[in-house]
Image: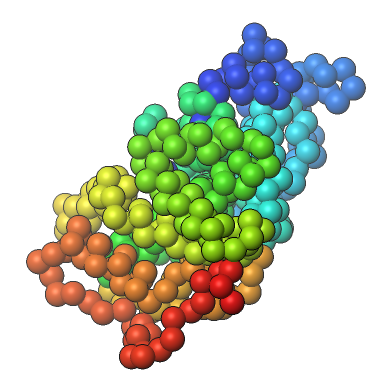
Amino acid sequence: MARHTYLTASSTLALMLAACGVPSSDRVPPLGSQMDPQTKQVKSLAGSKDQPNDVDAQIGFGTRDVKAWRRQRAEACLGPDEAPTSVTEAMLAGIRDPIMKTDLGQRLAADVAGHDSTLCTAQAMPLKDGKFGGVYKVHYRAMAVNDTVPTGQQILHAAHEWRHAWHDVQGFFTPDIEHNQQHHSAKVFMIEADARAFATAVAWQLREQGDNRAWEAALAIKTYRPIAQAFAQKMTTLTVLGDPPITRSDAALRAAMGVAYRTWFADGDMARPYAQQLVERAAGYAFSGQSWPGARALRYEEVVGIGRLPGQASSDRESYIQPADVTLAVDDAYQRMSPKDERVPVQGLPQPVVGRKAAPTPGKG
């Protein structure tokens, strides 16, 4: 059984602590410690038979090992609406809270409520490689972001990982590899492109609120800059076409996120690390004498919803992803993963209607 670990490409620890009102000279407490709400002193819970009153210690899913993993890290992880009760959780709140104050963040939090998703420190959930900005582990419904980068980057990467939590809740991650190599790879690419488009949209909304940290981070990161620029250009165009409030509409968000999604595929560097992981996975199967485990072709209805905004019904109409966007991902996966194999068509892919009137541009009726 193959499990998915999704890796993504945020101030230093001292800056993160300072942002939460914690002196930078304070050492981050070890796992299993808690802050007394009255004295503000950190106390150890090691050896205590009582579990902290923490969502991570009371999750409603998973095996005994998964529950133990989350329980052991209860004070080093923070849910979407959990009040921090430790120095470490206060640090995490400084990353989570800006996201959840945006319209998109609030809607996402409502969608993942009750599913025990959590944001952890890199100490509790080490990243495989320091060059990655974050990681989401489906098995634990947990995510972490790099703690060696500025706060703006951490907020940006956390928004990306929270979108993966949303993908998980919506059923876009499965425990087993069901699809053939081409289509499994295409689905991974679509999920990653969408997560980056979503994080960019959150950074944009924060910028509109006067918090420029995540947006400046997006412009500073090589693999985010083209996406942020494309997103901003689309919003600028919509502003010219209509009144500024139009850019705060769902229609405008879908239009700008669609452009951001397509920009992900236009830059080969963005897909490369994910393609490399998939190539290595395929090589691992071959080395052990096994075939790629999945064989089924992808169905359009399985992936079109990846592009929905949070808080919307499961409907093709509410997704920025169009048939051409699915084809874009499949073609890219085919060229990267299996150019010598037969191209496999996506099942149920709507065909363009000749002479069909184009959808109206937001702000133009």
Q: Is residue 73 left or right of residue 215?
A: right
Q: Is residue 334 visible?
A: yes
Q: How is the image coloured?
A: rainbow
Q: Position of residue 236 (x, y in %)?
A: 51, 53
Residue 316, above or below 10: below
**What residue is rendered at 47% in x and 42% in y?**
135
Residue furthest top as drawn: 25
Quarter of the image with the C terminus is: bottom right
**What residue is rendered at 71% in x and 24% in y?**
20
**What residue is rendered at 42% in x and 74% in y?**
322
Quarter of the image with the N terminus is: bottom left
Residue furthest right as drawn: 38
Q: Is residue 97 left or right of residue 4?
A: right
Q: Is residue 249 left or right of residue 216?
A: right
Residue furthest left as drawn: 340
Q: Position of residue 106 (x, y in %)?
A: 70, 53
Q: Position of residue 315 (x, y in %)?
A: 56, 78
Q: Position of residue 5 (x, y in %)?
A: 42, 49
